[in-house]
Image (spheres, rainbow, N blue to C red):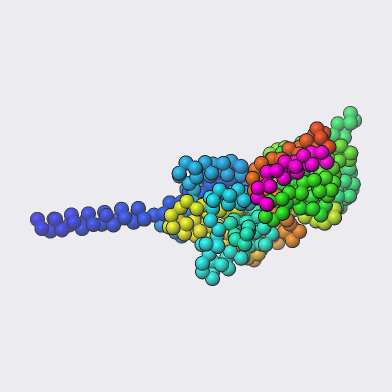
Amino acid sequence: MFKIGKKRLLAAALATLVSGIAQAKTDLTMYYPIAVGGPLTKVVDGMVSDFEKQNPDIHVNAIYAGNYNDARVKALAALKSGQPAQLAVMFSIDVHELMDLHAIIPFDEMAKTPEDKAWLHSFYPALMKNGEVNGKTWGVPFQRSTIVMYYNKDMFRAAGLDPNHPPATWKELVSMGEKLTHKDANGDVTQWGLMIPSTGYPYWMFGALTKENGQVLMNQAGTKTYFDKPAVVEALSFWKSLGTQYHIMPKGTIDWGTLRQNFLDQKTAMMWHSTGNLTAVKNNAKFDFGVAMLPANKEPGSPTGGGNFYLFKHSTPEQREAAFKLVKFMTSPEEAAKWSIATGYMGVSPAAYKTPALESYVKTFPQAAVARDQLKYATAELSTHQSGRVRKLLDDAIQAALTGEESPKAALSSAQKQATRILRRYH
């Protein structure tokens, strides 16, 4: 009888121990945007699964929230509901809004060891510009890009152009675009020379044109915009002229979401798009294609783009440590290399390109290095306080100019006046 009681006590103790271990598991919720092509969900799921195998005491619930705007809305809604996520991949340009809401903590608070501090300083400086504010690092790069030019080498050959010499200047862009634009007997265009998307993220494409014309769109503090500067007006006038004067691009707006398919269907010889589409183009193009840096006017350049990791303030110390560990894992050279190969996004650190996997991939597929090489000419993406409102002002101005509703100067002047009013309180 005593032995039976002893066994029962032991079994109960073991059950309590197992239950305690199960309860000790740290649960994380991570919001993640799916914004461009490629099997991104499966890739992220695979990375999370590998992390959980190495860290069996941590469980990660990855919630795929749509595009970047959807991810921001859902993450902030969860925060207000009292059931916040512990981390998220969100727009790198959301940093000021998230800081103003006191929703995030700087990574500096978590990077306490020499190894952690070395990791925090291991990323490409250009990719850190949107995440560093007031001397602290609020966002760490993960799903990052620059805008690159995809071009159809077969169409270049057919037009008598060198397939290994894509346009390097605005002047060459126009002259080559004219040779690559074809019309039928009725005068209808059957093949466009160029398409630049003007829905979805028009301010991002415009940031490339203004950088190429020697002008950025805002200050680093996110308190001032420069929408009405002469070089900015010139850049928008040039964009419009590609359709109305040179006729190498459709007039009006061009849809972000369908442009990649238009390029794959050979409706346009060149397109400007995110490097995040690279793997999808590689896997689906039935023709020889190239990838090039964007053409320069006064200088070369592109804004960086894409998503950063953020750590949310409303979490337990255990959750913060677990979330920090997950971010370090997913941005490690090996994982960043795997991510870059699978998607076309950049490896976010020089060390990623020194891994055997990515080093070998770039040798066999040199197009994968273009976005990285363009970083030396890159600028920060448009990011300000009240970022969503300010971006919409610029988006509306761009589309008003491209559709002929307003002149570029009038549209940008109006956007600047409204942006100045919004940002005045942050000066």
Left or right of residue 105: residue 59? left
- First to last magenta residue range: 409-427
Residue 371: x percent and y percent?
A: 72, 56
Left or right of residue 367: residue 192? right
Q: Is residue 411 magenta?
A: yes
Residue 213: x percent and y percent?
A: 82, 52
Q: Main secondary structure of the magenta part?
A: helix
Left or right of residue 210: residue 256? left
Res 214 seen here: yes
Depth order, front residue of 374/93: 93
Residue 308: x percent and y percent?
A: 60, 53
- Which residue is at 88% across, 50% downward? 172
Depth order, front residue of 37/404: 404
Left or right of residue 131: residue 179? right
On screen, residue 351 above or below 421: below
- Which residue is at 47% across, 51% downward? 314
- Which residue is at 78% across, 42% downward? 412
Name the residue furthest top: 186
On screen, residue 350 above or below 298: below
Q: Is residue 188 magenta?
A: no
- Which image quarter is the N terminus in? bottom left
